Image (cartoon, helix red, strand yellow):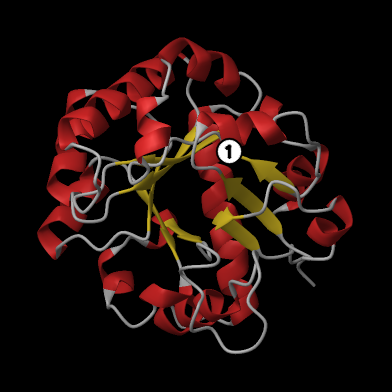
């Protein structure tokens, strides 16, 4: 019988002060995104095994954008395999010019130090793809992507992956994404707010079920596919050395 890993959540918001025991109780592998360099600094020394903290600069937060410092970001990136939440937001109070300057600086740093990127694009899908064309990087994961079919095709041509929350399961997006670019997320506590039962980071069961139905596979087969896609992403970016041992053990035993 094939070994099936625990669920994989590529994008969740987690309280930086959460106890380690509470994270272990999730029973899942989670990338916990942050909204600012300050928030990431508060967790950068944590070692939580199955939960990896990402350094982020949210496009929707004025303070995070105003306090962004390229040199500080470059230093913080050294200790994590993933950057998020970053990107552009067409509804933000932050001027788009400021968002673009921050995003370009981040992409330029990541051209030198490749990482997995969890990218926000609400209301700015076209602008975001233009920036990815301008400053191409490896490891792009479009979080909660809602771009048009034409823009989705363009994102696929760019090599992007897509992390899908429960909130997207009725959108029809799955039919536009190649099976080897599908990843799962909760975007807790936003993308799972209508999920039945207890809502926690790592709660991607609804995504696994829907991916399985779309691909004529079981829920557990869908989870294995998501992990295989994630392994491909890790290998493309080359961040194996920054992943904790529990993650590496899963990747080594996928068949």
Q: Along the horizontal axis of the image, is 110 left or right of 226?
A: left
Name the quadrant of the N terminus. bottom right
Q: Residue at x 14, y 35 (%)?
A: 130
Residue 251: give x, y in percent of width and height.
70, 46
Pick the front one: 227 or 43: 43
Residue 34 falls in which quadrant of the image?
A: top right
Q: Which residue is drawn at 24% across and 23% down?
A: 101
Q: Which residue lies furthest to the bottom in this view?
A: 196
Q: Tell me if residue 89 can be seen.
A: yes
Q: Is residue 238 above or below residue 57?
A: above
Residue 232: give x, y in percent of width and height.
52, 43
Residue 197 falls in which quadrant of the image?
A: bottom right
Q: Is mark 1 on a helix, strand or loop?
A: loop
Q: Is residue 219 above or below residue 179?
A: below
Pick the front one: 109 or 95: 95
Name the quadrant of the C terminus. bottom right
Residue 203: give x, y in percent of width and height.
63, 72
Q: In this view, does 179 lie above or below 93?
A: below
Identify residue for label 1. Answer: 54
Q: Residue at x 42, y 34 (%)?
A: 64
What is the count of numbered marks? 1
Q: Which residue is drawn at 64% across and 28% down?
A: 41
Residue 129: give x, y in percent of width and height.
19, 41
Q: Along the horizontal axis of the image, is 241 left or right of 144?
A: right
Mark 1 residue crowding within 10 angstroms, few (<14) / some (14–19) / many (20+)? many
Q: Along the horizontal axis of the image, is 245 left or right of 121?
A: right
Q: Tell me if residue 81 can be seen.
A: no
Q: Along the horizontal axis of the image, is 225 left or right of 138?
A: right
Q: Is residue 205 above or below residue 187?
A: below
């Amino acid at each position: 019988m094939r070994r099936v890993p625990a669920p994989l959540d590529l994008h969740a918001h987690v309280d930086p002060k959460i106890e380690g025991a509470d994270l272990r109780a999730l029973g899942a592998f989670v990338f916990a995104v942050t909204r600012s360099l300050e928030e990431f600094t508060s967790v950068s020394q944590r070692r939580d095994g199955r939960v990896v903290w990402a350094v982020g600069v949210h496009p929707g937060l004025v303070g995070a954008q105003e306090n962004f410092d390229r040199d500080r970001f470059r230093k913080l990136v050294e200790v994590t395999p993933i950057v998020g939440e970053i990107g552009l937001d067409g509804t933000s109070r932050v001027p788009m010019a400021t968002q673009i300057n921050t995003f370009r600086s981040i992409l330029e740093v990541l051209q030198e130090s490749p990482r997995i990127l969890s990218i926000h694009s609400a209301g700015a899908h076209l602008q975001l793809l233009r920036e990815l064309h301008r400053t191409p990087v490896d490891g792009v994961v479009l979080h909660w992507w809602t771009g048009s079919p034409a823009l989705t095709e363009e994102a696929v041509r760019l090599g992007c992956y897509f992390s899908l929350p429960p909130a997207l399961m009725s959108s029809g997006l799955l039919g536009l994404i190649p099976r080897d670019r599908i990843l799962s997320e909760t975007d807790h506590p936003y993308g799972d707010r209508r999920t039945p039962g207890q809502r926690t980071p790592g709660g991607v069961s609804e995504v696994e079920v829907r991916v399985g139905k779309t691909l004529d596979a079981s829920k557990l087969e869908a989870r294995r596919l998501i992990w295989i896609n994630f392994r491909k992403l890790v290998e493309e970016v080359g961040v194996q050395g920054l992943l904790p041992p529990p993650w590496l053990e899963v990747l080594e035993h996928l068949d």
